[in-house]
Amino acid sequence: MNNNIIKVTDETFKKNVIQNEKFVLVDFWAPWCGPCKTFVPILETVSKLYVGKLIVVKINIDDNPKIINTYQIKNIPTLLLFKNGKVIHSNVGVISQERLEHILNTTIN
């Protein structure tokens, strides 16, 4: 994982996501999830393309039940896009880089 992606936990979620004024893309994942693994290169690329505009964070669902319950995460990978502590977009399942960039371009720019 590259340096542009931050790992968060139940304890650090509020500081890194909710209290952040920037756009924050949260990837809910698990180490045993095959589709989550295939999505890593897309997240790494997106985190580099949107440096300064977007913060990308990952949260392991196995280790962080509080946040998983708060956002009712039932399937992974799930992406939630936050702005000012509020979810403004969600996606369940693997998404293509092109589709993700389209969503980010229309939302962020």
Image (spheres, helix red, strand yellow):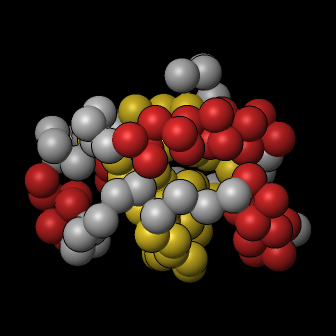
Q: Position of residue 77 (x, y in %)?
A: 41, 56
Q: Position of residue 107 (x, y in %)?
A: 76, 74
Residue at 12% x, 53% y is 65
The number of callouts visible is 0
Snapshot quadrant of residue 60 = top left
Residue 99, above or below 26 = below
In the figure, is residue 68 to the left or right of 12?
left
In the figure, is residue 70 to the left or right of 108?
left
Residue at 56% x, 77% y is 89
Residue at 38% x, 41% y is 34
Residue at 55% x, 66% y is 81
Residue 38, above or below 67 = above
Snapshot quadrant of residue 99 = bottom right
Residue in the foreground of this view, choosing between 36 and 9: 36
Q: Position of residue 15 (x, y in %)?
A: 38, 47
**Quadrant that contains the C terminus:** bottom right
Residue in the foreground of this view, choosing between 97 and 70: 97
Q: Does any portion of residue 101 appear in the rendered image?
A: no
In the figure, is residue 22 to the left or right of 97?
left
Q: Does any portion of residue 71 appear in the rendered image?
A: yes
**Quadrant that contains the N terminus:** top right
Q: Position of residue 49 (x, y in %)?
A: 82, 41
Residue in the foreground of this view, choosing between 72 and 21: 72
